[in-house]
């Protein structure tokens, strides 16, 4: 979920944090990539990411899921479940279980 390219002024002039699908840059919801320009006098022990990291985007809390009944958040995604008396008929939608049929 997290790919980092640390500063190394010998090879690059910036460091990147790229979050995978379902994650975002901490403190900046909706943003999946952060780039910081490195100083030419960069020292190896400097944290050029400024403590930035990837955070799970909670589709359930943010109501961006497609679940018909209940949404369950997971790291990088979510899954759906149905109320009693129903079952999932695909990834998102529930169908009534006719126990009399």
Image (cartoon, rainbow, N blue to C red):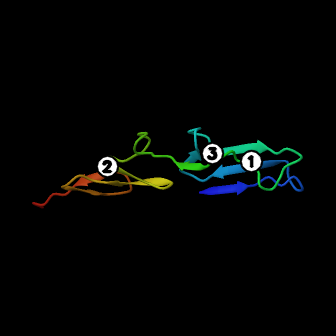
Q: Which residue is mark 2?
A: 70
Outermost residue, left direction? 100
Estimate the x, y position of residue 32 in percent, counting from the top left. 62, 45
**Nearer-N-terminus badge (2/1):** 1
Q: Which residue is mark 1?
A: 48
**Which residue is rendered at x = 13% and y = 60% of the image?**
99
Q: Secondary structure at mark 1?
A: loop
Q: 98 and 6: which one is in front? A: 6
Q: Which image quadrant is residue 37 in?
A: top right
**Mark 2–mark 3 distance (CA, rounded to whole Å):** 26 Å
Quadrant of the image containing the C terminus: bottom left
Estimate the x, y position of residue 29 in percent, counting from the top left. 56, 39
Q: Nearer the viewer, mark 2 or mark 3?
A: 3
- The numbered disc on residue 32 is 3
Estimate the x, y position of residue 65 in percent, counting from the top left. 42, 45
**Mark 2–mark 1 distance (CA, rounded to whole Å):** 40 Å
């Amino acid at each position: 979920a997290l790919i980092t390219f640390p500063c190394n002024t010998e090879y690059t002039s910036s460091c990147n944090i790229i979050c995978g699908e379902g994650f975002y840059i901490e403190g900046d919801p909706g943003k999946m990539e952060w780039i910081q320009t490195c100083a030419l006098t960069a020292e190896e022990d400097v944290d050029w990411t400024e403590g930035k990291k990837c955070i799970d985007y909670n589709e359930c809390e943010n109501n961006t899921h497609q679940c018909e009944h209940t949404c369950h958040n997971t790291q990088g995604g979510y899954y759906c479940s149905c109320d009693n008396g129903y079952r999932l008929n695909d990834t998102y939608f529930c169908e009534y279980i006719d126990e009399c049929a």
